[in-house]
């Protein structure tokens, strides 16, 4: 039989274990679901795989859950009811019923974060601009117009230092390598759009070509913004550099090798998950 002293020590240890378990096993702050396709371009596939490795690490650190699906039929009201934040990692929904559900979700306060190709639309192409609400109203950018090539880092400047997504960033920082997009509409003329980051002029010339129009020498290019009517944030990042020339499809860059850019992404997600506009 245990002595009274040993029983007391054991009881104390059990209490401490229970207390520590209670402290560390905190409930998740919010739930995230990431939709992706990961079939259309090796650079986008590369980003999706990276994101699906990186976000679970952040989820463990910041106490949120991170689930993924490549089944876009899950974009329905019953499935989305479990989640406070939806991510589009590389594409958009195509079925009219999925688009309608997504619009209702964000109009009723659901949060969204989109990366790079999630905003792409070009008529004619495999992704035509056939969803006016999403591209013109929600994103505000309209169609894709052009891009830089090859994927290269850029110096980004913070336009709004008061926003929760950007207030901990330096005034300028170097991004990870990316293919940068230009858009049909001037977001500066839209009163609902809050541009958070743009390409700093010190980045020019941006891109290496070989085609002259793939190298930007001047201009204004927003790369991260929100629409103040919704809980949403779009980031142009999400295209790695890939060895297409030698047909190895080897990854030549990582979208998560900039500490400041990573800070932007996680602070954006924590803001979206907080439920605040």
Image (cartoon, rainbow, N blue to C red):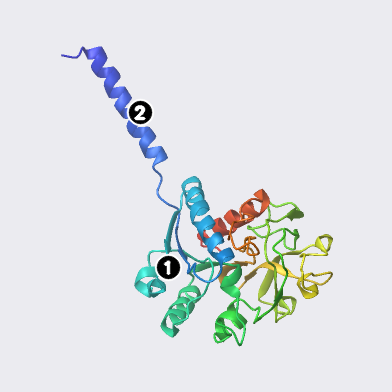
Eye-nearest disc, 1 or 2: 1
Which residue is more in the foreground, 174 or 206?
206
Q: Position of residue 45 (x, y in %)?
A: 53, 64
Mark 1 touching mark 2, by CB under 8 A?
A: no
Q: Determine whether, in the image, residue 226 is placed left or right of residue 98.
A: right
* Residue marked by disc 2: 16
Q: Secondary structure at mark 2?
A: helix
Q: Which image quadrant: the N terminus?
A: top left
Q: Position of residue 61 (x, y in %)?
A: 50, 45
Q: Position of residue 253 (x, y in %)?
A: 64, 55
Q: Which quarter of the figure has residue 252? A: bottom right
* Residue marked by disc 1: 70
- The correct choice, above or below, for 145 with respect to 154 in the image is below
Q: Determine whether, in the image, residue 36 is placed left or right of residue 177.
A: left
Residue 150 numbered tag? none
- The correct choice, above or below, for 221 with respect to 68 in the image is below
What residue appears at the point 40 percent right and 69 percent down from the top-left corner? 80
């Amino acid at each position: 039989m245990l002595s009274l002293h040993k029983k007391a020590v054991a009881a104390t240890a059990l209490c401490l274990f229970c207390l520590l378990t209670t402290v560390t096993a905190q409930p998740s702050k919010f739930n995230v679901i990431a939709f992706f396709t990961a079939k259309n371009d090796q650079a986008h596939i590369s980003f999706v795989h990276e994101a699906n490795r990186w976000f679970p690490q952040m989820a463990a650190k910041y106490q949120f859950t991170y689930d993924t699906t490549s089944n876009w039929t899950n974009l329905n009201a019953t499935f989305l009811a479990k989640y406070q934040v939806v991510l589009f990692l590389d594409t958009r929904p195509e079925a009219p019923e999925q688009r309608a559900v997504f619009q209702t979700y964000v109009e009723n306060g659901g949060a969204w974060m989109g990366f790079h190709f999630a905003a792409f639309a070009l008529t004619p192409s495999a992704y035509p601009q056939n969803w006016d609400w999403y591209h013109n109203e929600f994103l505000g950018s309209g169609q894709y117009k052009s891009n830089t090539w090859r994927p290269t880092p850029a110096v980004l400047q913070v336009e709004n230092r008061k926003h929760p997504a950007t207030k901990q960033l330096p005034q300028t920082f170097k991004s990870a390598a990316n293919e940068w997009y230009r858009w049909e509409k001037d977001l500066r003329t839209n009163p609902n759009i809050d541009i958070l980051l743009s390409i700093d002029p010190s980045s020019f010339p941006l891109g290496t070509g070989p085609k002259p129009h793939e190298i930007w020498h001047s201009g204004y290019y927003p790369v991260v913004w929100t629409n103040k009517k919704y809980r949403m944030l779009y980031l142009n990042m999400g295209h790695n550099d890939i060895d297409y020339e030698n047909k190895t499809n080897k990854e030549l860059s990582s979208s998560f090798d900039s500490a400041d850019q990573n800070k932007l992404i996680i602070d954006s997600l924590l803001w979206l998950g907080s439920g605040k506009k």
